């Protein structure tokens, strides 16, 4: 009788002794998982940032060359652009030097930050195109998840408009991957644009389902990339409207 009563006591003591190690193990697993999610989020945003810059560089090149595929004439008092300046890397360098946006896109799309001095106003972040309802820097910092959601809603809304113009009134696809696939196959967008938008789409979805918890820096990074891709989509929308 005594022996049969002792077993539950022994088992209870063993469980108590193992609670500490089990809790530590669970904590480590959660930490490892958290590190993995953070690393994936950082990698996705890095890819989106790189692809967005490349898409902007390609849009600038296309705008400058036009249908004739001739190099744009040098501005008065300036020499011919160097080989480095005609590359994507050169475009990125000019964007950093000028402050916020490359001058060509600022003039085309009425973007705030018309001079290098205005970069201070935005603390180094891209100023929003006036036609895009992007969340402010303050709102994005205060509520990173909301900033990411609203930034993608603005970008996705314009891409949907582009898709409708491309399809000329026909019912369009319901999801972003299909929309981008159609635009790419039609030769309307380049791979950099598709890859950039898809990475932002993935990050937005991860945030919505709680698989990623972005901080202010990540949300601002997302917002910057979304705004660059938005301006590229604006250029495409204008082209489609011109074509009728």
Image (cartoon, helix red, strand yellow):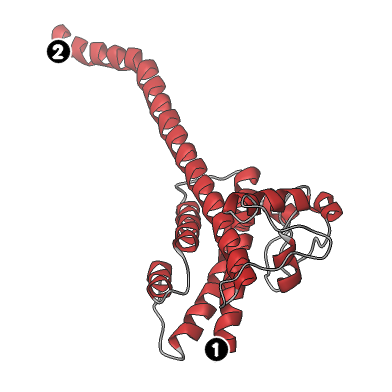
Q: Residue 121 location in percent, x, y?
A: 83, 53
Q: Crowding at label 1, few (<14), some or many (≥20) Cα neighbours within 10 Å?
A: few
Name the side, left or right, on which 64 lies relative to 1. Answer: right
Label 1 residue SS: helix
Disc 1 or 2, which lies upstream in sequence?
Answer: 2
Name the side, left or right, on which 127 lies relative to 210. Answer: right
Work out which residue is located at the far top of the displayed protein and give it.
2
Which corner quadrant of the image does residue 111 belong to? bottom right
Quadrant of the rendering where the N terminus is positioned: top left
Residue situated in front as seen by the camera: 161 or 142:
161
Label 2 residue SS: helix
Residue situated in front as seen by the camera: 75 or 143:
75
Rendered image: mark on residue 193: none
- Asked if the residue at tag 2 contacts the one at tag 1, i.e. Cβ–Cβ closer than 8 Å, the answer is no
- Residue of label 1: 243
Q: Residue at x 82, y 65 (%)?
A: 76
Residue situated in front as seen by the camera: 67 or 93:
67
What whole-number distance in Å separates the C-alpha atoms at marks 1 and 2? Answer: 88 Å
Q: Residue 206 location in percent, x, y?
A: 45, 52
In the rendered view, tell whether residue 98 sits above or below residue 75: above
Q: Residue at x 41, y 34 (%)?
A: 33
Rendered image: mark on residue 4: 2
Name the side, left or right, on which 212 lies relative to 129. Answer: left
Q: Crowding at label 2, few (<14), some or many (≥20) Cα neighbours within 10 Å?
A: few
Q: Residue 89 location in percent, x, y?
A: 60, 49
């Amino acid at each position: 009788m005594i022996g049969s009563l002792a077993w539950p006591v022994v088992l209870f003591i063993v469980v108590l002794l193992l609670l500490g190690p089990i809790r530590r193990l669970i904590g480590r697993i959660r930490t490892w998982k958290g590190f993995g999610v953070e690393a994936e989020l950082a990698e996705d945003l890095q890819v989106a940032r790189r692809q967005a810059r490349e898409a902007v560089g390609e849009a600038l090149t296309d705008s400058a060359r036009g249908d004739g595929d001739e190099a744009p004439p040098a501005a008065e008092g300036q020499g011919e652009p160097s080989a480095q300046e005609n590359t994507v890397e050169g475009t990125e360098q000019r964007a950093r030097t000028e402050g916020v946006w490359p001058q060509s896109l600022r003039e085309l799309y009425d973007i705030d930050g018309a001079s290098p001095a205005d970069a201070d106003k935005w603390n180094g972040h891209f100023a929003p195109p006036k036609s895009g309802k992007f969340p402010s820097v303050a709102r994005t910092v205060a509520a990173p998840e909301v900033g990411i959601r609203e930034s993608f809603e603005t970008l996705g809304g314009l891409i949907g408009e582009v898709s409708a113009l491309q399809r000329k009134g026909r019912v369009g696809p319901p999801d972003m991957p299909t929309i981008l696939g159609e635009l790419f196959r039609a030769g309307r967008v380049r791979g950099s644009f598709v890859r950039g938008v898809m990475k932002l789409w993935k990050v937005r979805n991860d945030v919505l389902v709680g698989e990623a918890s972005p901080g202010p820096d990540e949300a601002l990074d997302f917002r910057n990339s979304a705004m660059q891709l938005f301006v590229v989509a604006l250029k495409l929308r204008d082209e489609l409207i011109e074509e009728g």
